[in-house]
Image: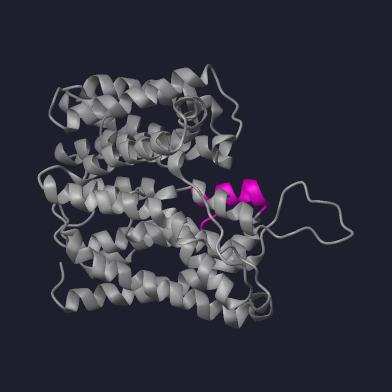
Amino acid sequence: MSSTETLSTKTFPLPTLSGGLLLTTWLLTLIFALGLLDARLEATVFAWLYVLLEFRNLKPKQRKPISALLIGGIGFSALSLWHTGDIDLLALGSEHLMLVMLLTSVNFIRLATRLYAGERNKGAKSFIATLTGMHLFSSVANFSSLLLVGDQIRRPAVAGQAEPTTPSQSSLSYILLSRGFALAIFWSPFLSMIPLVLHQLPDVNMAAVYPWAIGIVVFALLFTLLESRLRYGKELAEYQGYPMKPTTLMLPAVLIGTLLVAHQLFPNTAMLVLVSIIAVTVPLLLMIATQPLQESSKRVGNLVTNVLPNARPEISLFLAAGFLAAAVKSTISAGLIPSPVEHTNALVASLGIHQFAVVAIFGGLLAQATTTPTLMAVAYMVGVSLSMSSSVFSGSNFILQGQYGIRNRDVYRDNMPYSIVVLAFSTLLLFVMEANGVQ
């Protein structure tokens, strides 16, 4: 059982209730997305009930931005209602229901997640192997990869000193964890970014996006290796990481391979729907095939009771952001506020949009003005990836701060030069794309 599954959580009222609500939301949304039954109203009600039950269990740092989004949404909704006398409550509440379905489904992946150590070595070879493994593994393991890999590479206790209450991470290990995870959002459909792009930019052709996105990933990884040699050369020479056996990467390969086959068989089914189905069914089948039925049932029950309630920050943030985005769009449609831009281009894209919630909001605001979906898709990915690795408010850094005592100054010191260089490269790339006629 993974360490993330055994994390305790302060729950109010009953975790089984909130976990059941989220699981029911996933099922009803999937039924609606497949066109089997119009269950959008019921799914929306269950989703917001989940947020209501779990809101008290959010940390203060998490409640503040969510509350701000909700208050903003209420304000814009009131403005629209005041001038038009009409408001669509279902549209306001269900704006990001499909993303909630996805976020729920990817939690099932950890049921079949396992780490297998490869040949132990040290130095740059160990760092490169661990960084590559972390990057590929996190493409499906999501946030749990930070803990699973992090526990294997945490800094050992110094002889003669007391064991620290919170295990720490060296600069190289922190860089490896934060960037390895953040860069996977450029290409993995099992993380939230690709589905968010498809949701905000329904006309985007991902085949046109991927070559540019992968180019940024390659540049960022190469820069990370160069920076590690220049800034942490002494530590790099003695670095002992956690190279993984190919067996560890079997699950990502199976999931992505299954998705590609399913997309060929069902080309008219939305990618987000396919991901949500595969993320649940494949891990369940693998778990049942490799473990006794009693143990499998126990792990599924633990997922509903403990893991799904712990998804409260992401679920609440996405629903609140969707609520605000839908409210703002209603005021734009009513002619109360103008669209921020008339059309998009490389300059608009290079302004940068950070964090999933902000992308969700501005993606909605710019929906009618987006004339360059490929440029905007790349820009959204860059903004989210850099904020995930370099912002002290990102979900990944929240986890690393709480689990390994990573300090705010460590976040800025270790990732700020990287952010500046990758942002400059990505901005230049956007103008190169535009010059080559990419829209």
**Residue 352 visible in the snapshot:** no
329 vs 399, left or right, is left
The image quarter containing residue 435 is bottom left
The residue at the far left in this view is 268
Question: In the picture provided, is 88 more to the left or to the right than 249?
Answer: left
Residues 127 and 224: in front is: 127
Residue shown at 36% from the left, 26% from the top? 23
In percent of width and height, residue 101 lies at 31, 34
Q: Residue at x 50, y 28 (%)?
A: 295
**Numbered marks: total:** 0
- Residue 369 percent across, percent down from the top left: 16, 54
Q: Residue at x 16, y 27 (%)?
A: 84
388 vs 294, nearest the viewer: 294
Quadrant location of the N terminus in the rendered image: top right
The picture places residue 5, in percent across and down from the top left corner, at: 54, 36
The vertical placement of 53 against 312, above or below, is above
Q: Foreground residue, 91 or 290?
A: 290
Question: At 39% across and 56% down in the image, what residue appears?
Answer: 384
Left or right of residue 267: residue 133: right
Rendered-image quadrant of the C terminus: bottom left
The colour style of the image is: one colour
Range covered by the magenta-colored residues: 390-405
Tell me where residue 308 sits by quadrant: top left
Where residue 243 appears, as percent x and y from the top left, is 55, 64
Q: Is residue 394 magenta?
A: yes
Query: What secondary structure is the stretch in magenta mostly built from?
Result: helix
As drawn, 164 above or below 30: below
